Amino acid sequence: MNENSGKCLLLFQSIHRVMQAERIISSLGISYQIVPVPKEFSSECGMCIEVLCSSNNILVAELQRNNIFFNKVKVHI
Amino acid sequence: MTKIVDCRGQLCPQPLINTKKALKETLKGEAIQIIIDNATSCQNVSRFLTDNAVPFGIDEQNGVFTITINSQGIEFNPKKEAEEYCEVSFPGKSSSYIIALTSCFMGDGNEDLGRILMKGFLNSLPNLEKLPQEIICYNSAVTLAQKGTDTAQSLVKLNNLGVNITLCGTCVDFFGIKEEIEVGTISNMLYIAERLSSGIHVVKP
């Protein structure tokens, strides 16, 4: 499985960052879901954003341009 | 001597109440036989006894269950009310509680935060061990079921897992979104009042 297939979780430092990121992702027309951070991951915020890994390139550039930093975790089903 | 508690024809929570009463009244050395004619009530009584460390055996014949208990002869103080073990049978992971969504936000205070919390809440539900029987939406919560929203997709997913989605008809009308509803059954206040007052657990996030 290549790294652009399946779903990825974007973990942020705070809920404010999640909210900013959601607005950006939504404006880009990228499909996403707000989901709770799985128990196995550590995050300072309880919410994260699930996206298709294939949408990462556009997303990363746009989030970085807005100084929003995140950790990306691939979801294994 | 065996005390017979005949619960045939009774629906939950009555067999649980009768079992608790018998355990409190029976003397040391006496046996109790609880006779139940539906599997769900039998499971509920079994869970009640197991949780309270009461040894018992079950015999089943032609759909009639006989639960035999040898009384411990000590004062019986259940950890939880017997009625709390009353779960009705539903397919899948459903359980006996309803979620009432009273607005499109989760909690009071900041609306942007409340909106994102609600999305997280709805997307958490499919991961729960026990799903709600039903989600009832009223006031601005009906907009969560509006076509084109990510919350509607979350509700569709829950609906596909067997969770009934009920929308307040007056509220759908108020927000003018009747033609834009993606998921859910439009219902009236009488139904909502009946469901919320039925004695089932109601969770309001």
Image: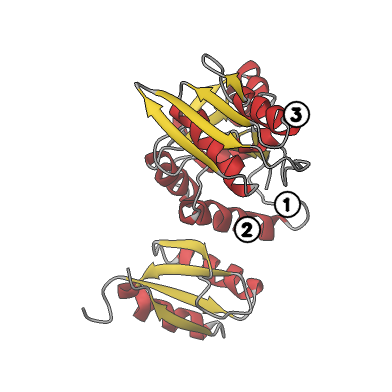
Label 2 resides on the chain identified as B
Q: Position of residue B140 (x, y in %)?
A: 64, 38
What is the C-alpha distance between the residues marked 2 and 1? 8 Å
Q: Tag on residue B117?
A: 2
Q: Position of residue A33 (x, y in %)?
A: 46, 61
Q: Nearer the viewer, residue B153 or B191?
A: B191
Q: Tag on residue B107?
A: 1
- Where disc 2 sits, the SS reads helix
Which image quadrant is residue B92 in?
A: top left
- Residue lying at 47% horizontally and 76% vertically, measured from the top left: A10
Q: Position of residue B105 (x, y in %)?
A: 66, 49
**Which amino acid type corresponds to the residue marked 3 in the rendered image?**
Glu
Task: In the displayed orientation, state which residue is furthest to the left.
Answer: A1
Q: Quadrant of the N terminus of chain A?
A: bottom left
Which residue, given by chain and number where applicable, does mark 3 sit on?
A: B25
Mark 2 or 3, closer to the camera:
3
- Where disc 3 sits, the SS reads helix
Label 1 resides on the chain identified as B
Q: Position of residue B29 (x, y in %)?
A: 66, 36
Label 3 resides on the chain identified as B
Do the residues marked 2 and 3 share a common chain?
yes
Of the two numbered discs 3 and 1 on the same chain, state the one appearing first in sequence: 3
**Which amino acid type corresponds to the residue marked 2 in the rendered image?**
Leu
